[in-house]
Image: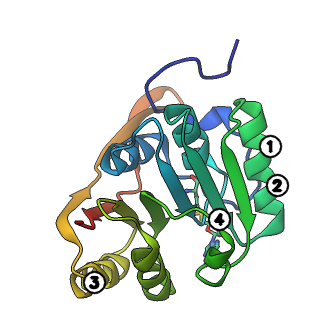
Amino acid sequence: MSLWPFITPGIPDRLFERLPGIPLTKREIRVLLISALRLRKDSVLWDIGAGTGTIPVECGLLCPEGRIFAIERDNEVASLIRENCDRFSVPNVEVIEGNAPECLDRISVRPHRVCFEGGKSLKPILEAVWNLLLPDGRIVATAGSLESLYLLSEGFAQLQVRNIEVVQSGVNRLETRGNNQVLAAVDPMFIISGEKLS
Ligand SMILES: C[S@@+](CC[C@H](N)C(=O)[O-])C[C@H]1O[C@@H](n2cnc3c(N)ncnc32)[C@H](O)[C@@H]1O
């Protein structure tokens, strides 16, 4: 039986292979991000900075007729993405090893959907993917700080991204600490999304 035989997203974090020091988009944030992507069975998704590969795995399962491109600059992390795709028997993920935005012209298929995490070099990535995003495509980015959110909001406005939505997560998980059950916060994230009208 498959490791995740369900039709809903939200694979528990503990089921993924991990590498020390490589962050993972936490399950609850991933679910919000994936809902903002509004996937179709045949979506072409680019996940830029795919890390552990949680998003390619989930989206590969949700889009059995689609193609998922996981873009990752670190070779060791790129191997981890392949391992996680094998682990969950996801056949439709292609890992592109390279630094975005330079490596994006190696991908032969333009995306309907793009996701990435906001960081210092996000403006050139945002501009490059916006030009390549197909009409009616959606773009979703996450930001863990006000600075990243600001850069993303400014970038979305400059590119005239339509129907922009910003959501901030507020998630607590029950944890056992000693003899007590406590609620521990999952780092809040902003999820900013929008679309390119035809
Ligand atoms: C926070 S992790 C992503 C976590 C991922 N969403 C997950 O759930 O596993 C960010 C990843 O982006 C990669 N990265 C950062 N900037 C990049 C760039 N310009 N091009 C390609 N990969 C990049 C890093 O190597 C890192 O593995």
Q: Does the residue labelled 4 lie within 8 Å of ligand 1?
A: yes
Q: Mark 4 points at which residue?
A: 71
Which disc number belongs to residue 18?
A: none
Q: Residues within 10 Å of mark 2 (few under 14, many from 20)?
A: some
Q: What residue type is labelled 3?
A: Leu
Instruction: State whether residue 124 appears in this view.
Output: yes
Label whose residue precedes the other's in the sequence (4 or 3) = 4
Q: In which quarter of the image is residue 184?
A: top left
Residue visible at 36% across and 50% down in the picture: 37
Amino acid type assigned to the residue bearing label 1 in the image: Glu
Q: Nearer the viewer, mark 4 or mark 2?
A: 4
Q: In this view, does 70 lie to the left or right of 45?
A: right
Q: Do the residues labelled 2 and 1 touch (CB within 8 Å)?
A: yes
The part of the image, by quadrant, that contains residue 145 is bottom left
Q: What is the number of the mark on residue 159?
A: 3
Badge 1 crowding class, 10 Å Cα cut-off, few under 14, some 14 to 19, many 20 or more, is some
